[in-house]
Amino acid sequence: RPPRSTLFPYTTLFRSRSGTSALAGALNVLGISLGEHLLAPGEDNPKGYWEHQGAVEIHERLLAALDRRWDDVRPLPVGWLTGDAARTALAEISEMISREFVETPVWAVKDPRICRFLPLWIEALQILGIRPVVLFVGRQPSEVAASIATRNHWSAPISEMLWLRHVLEAEAASRALPRAAVIYDDLLADPATTVSTALVRLGIGITDPSAVKQRALAKFVDSADRHHVHRKMEANPTALAQIADAAYASLAEIAQGVDAWQALKQCATRFDAEWQRCGSSIEAVADMAHRFSVDEVAVRIKASQLASDLHAQIRWSE
């Protein structure tokens, strides 16, 4: 039989506020499987994240082994792909795919961490004889930053660095694969046409949604879910803001059918140059923040253990 296809809908951050959940949910409405074990909805996304729990857990373990977190703006360690942690993750990814999607002709995985670990997924899929295609979703960086500021209280440069790190690493890793892009604005305005057009470009056979599915898409992808609107670039934008806006503009052209992948690649060159200029200072601060985070997690675990022990002692005493 022909090779199965795997669709990667993703762009930027873990629960990135970038439209990834809307896109993944739309694919599910169209009948593309996302697996049986998805993360439960949360307060910041009541319709669901549409993230496969197994993939999230594999990525989290790998990030921890690499001394990183989802919100770390630093590049991954040199040679990470050939290390023991990556080899373990490769085996786990292969096992998960074989267990969850063995009989599924077209399926998708949504977890924005895939942006950084795409080389590992490509290797696993090649071993299993599955054809991967990649679907980017782009949202105005200023809207992403505003949404993250509301949720996490982070300044715009942090969001811009994370956005660029994920988008540009995903672009670099996917150059040999069929790939397409959709824009969040287009997805809200006309979900059926936007998703169908992208799938056609990727060679995925779900090209003509029925009237029932079109109504279901229109109900699921609701413009009322959009809480932040793009603001015009400030009079003196930072270098990061300029690069992020240029990257988004390239994605917007790609979504319209223009071959602007080279322009997106040039954004990576600009980002690398900016990182060379000031990255050592950023890395030092990021490392310190990571240490704080690790210590906080350890304290939370210890507090939980103490609370459990105390509760058990109280019950025994009673």
Image: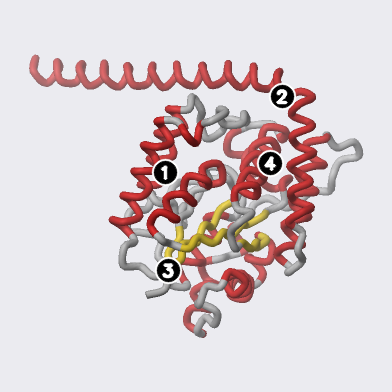
Amino acid at the residue labelled 1: Val
Residue at image coords 34%, 61%: 101
Residue under label 4? 164
- Dot placed on the residue nearer the N-terminal end, 2 or 1: 1
- The percent position of residue 123, horizontal first and vertical second, equals 46, 49
Residue at image coords 72%, 33%: 157
- Dot placed on the residue nearer the N-terminal end, 1 or 4: 1
Is 54 rendered above or below residue 221? above
Residue under label 3? 3
Determine if residue 4 is in view. Answer: yes
Tag nearer the camera, 3 or 4: 3
Residue under label 1? 56
Q: CA distance from mark 2 to mark 1?
A: 28 Å
Which numbered dot is residue 279? 2
Residue at image coords 9%, 14%: 317
Please identify the quarter of the rendering in which residue 135 is found.
bottom right
- Dot placed on the residue nearer the N-terminal end, 3 or 4: 3
Q: CA distance from mark 3 to mark 4?
A: 32 Å
Amino acid at the residue labelled 2: Gly
Disc 4 is placed on an element classified as helix
Tag nearer the camera, 1 or 3: 3
Q: CA distance from mark 1 to mark 4?
A: 21 Å
- Dot placed on the residue nearer the N-terminal end, 2 or 4: 4
- Which quadrant is home to the N terminus? bottom left
Disc 3 is placed on an element classified as loop
